[in-house]
Image (spheres, rainbow, N blue to C red):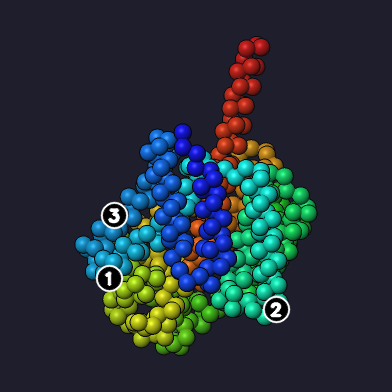
Amino acid sequence: MVSLNKIFYGLFVLMLIVGVYTYQLMWFKSSDELITLLLALLCMIDILGNHNHQRYKGLFFVVGVMLFYVLYSLVFVHYNTAKAIMYDFFIQLKPFIAFYVAYSMGVRFDASQKRFLKRLSIVLSVIMFVIIAAGFGEVAFFHVAYFGIISTILFLIYYYCTCQNQTRKDRIIMLLMLAVGLFSTRAKFYGFFVVAIYILFMYKPGILSRVKLKQWLMMVVVFCAVLYVAWGKINYYFISSGFFSGAEDMDDSFARAVLYVRSPQVFIDHPFLGSGLASYATFSSGIVSYSQLYKEYGIDEVWGLLEDDCPFVSDTYFPELVQFGLVGIILFFYFWIWVYRKIKPSVIDSYAISLYKGGILIVLFLAIESIAGSVFLQGSGIVAMILLGFIVRDISVIKERHALAEKQAKTERQIEV
């Protein structure tokens, strides 16, 4: 049997270092794509060498759906080149490859590997704090937004590595690590920070079924705090931009907001299967080759979305779902419903509850970042999806053990009778 644990672990650490932490300093900007390809290769080795193809049904389904959209984009809609469509095909697959490798392959971080990752996360967090405090944050990490993203990834890694025996000291360390991201001055990070504090120190599964007035008030306070710190972005993307008002004349600086404003129109015109790959709000639709859809909807003259000069074309994630239409959107949200059902603990187990809270934090991080960023498709998203795959698998194992124990106990009772 081919052992893949050490190879996978090495790729995970490599993704953290070159695909997330030092990504902006690297001259090679496709490190996350290359490492994801290597993860896909590990899948093939596992399937061919260990005959574990049954485990990868979910990944096969996702790849099949994406291949269908490649054919649809090439034959039935003609908004971009074959090169851009194939590039977008792989970019859209990256997070799902990462998730299913972690979920299906059965690789595990052992105790020594987790200890190393904990220490590495702390060291990288301290180094980032020193760099930011010295005034070189944007030199090392390109943009203040990455302070929050990187801090969150380090926080999530430390969280996963301490799930089984998490102490109050661990939670304080994680909070300090996450606090480095406050230097980002991004509303979306502030919102996640508030939610993370609540989940770390106050939230318990099932709390809504037995809440008291004091707990309801606490949740209202948390919600208001998140709304307050995120109001700038909510106003920017959905109110001032004209999303709700229907305004047609918008400032040129509202490039990302324009993608939100025009997405309902794209959806209405391509309701069932969408506008196709590399057509809207993706890196491939602007940087690889310019989508003709932008000219069709009159947004090719908006600053940030200009042909040959479109730095903000992929600075948001949710609008690009119109590429897949109603069918793709339903499948996308079905995946997340499936994930939630998998991570929701059905047994009284402190480890499962800790894993569940970690899964919720990852999903919230990806959801919040996807409002005004494309982290889901970047190295940070790959690391987060690997951790989520681990969490889904670990909770499934715990549920199976409890089910087996209950079955054995029931059999023993029957024998006694």
Q: Quadrant of residue 85?
A: bottom left
Estimate the spatial distance between the alpha carbons at disc 3 and disc 2, rounded to whole Å: 50 Å
Vertical arrangement, residue 131 with respect to residue 100, above or below: below
- Residue 68: mark in rendering: 3
Query: Residue 94 at x, y = what percent?
Result: 43, 57
Q: Secondary structure at mark 3?
A: helix
Is 396 displayed left or right of 349 in the figure?
left
Marks 1,3: beta carbons within 8 A = no
Vertical arrangement, residue 56 with respect to residue 124, above or below: above
- Which amino acid type corresponds to the residue marked 2 in the rendered image? Ala
In this figure, what is the number of numbered marks?
A: 3
Q: Secondary structure at mark 1?
A: loop
Query: Residue 25 at x, y = what percent?
Result: 53, 72
Of mark 3 and mark 2, the one earlier in the sequence is: 3
Neighbourhood count class around disc 2 (C-alpha, 10 Å): few under 14, some 14–19, many 20 upward: few
Estimate the spatial distance between the alpha carbons at disc 1 and disc 2, rounded to whole Å: 45 Å
Is residue 264 visible from the viewing direction of this image? Answer: no
Location of mark 1 (residue): 80
The residue under the point 41% across, 42% down is 45
- Which amino acid type corresponds to the residue marked 3 in the rendered image? Phe
Is 254 displayed left or right of 325 in the figure?
right
- Which amino acid type corresponds to the residue marked 1 in the rendered image? Asn
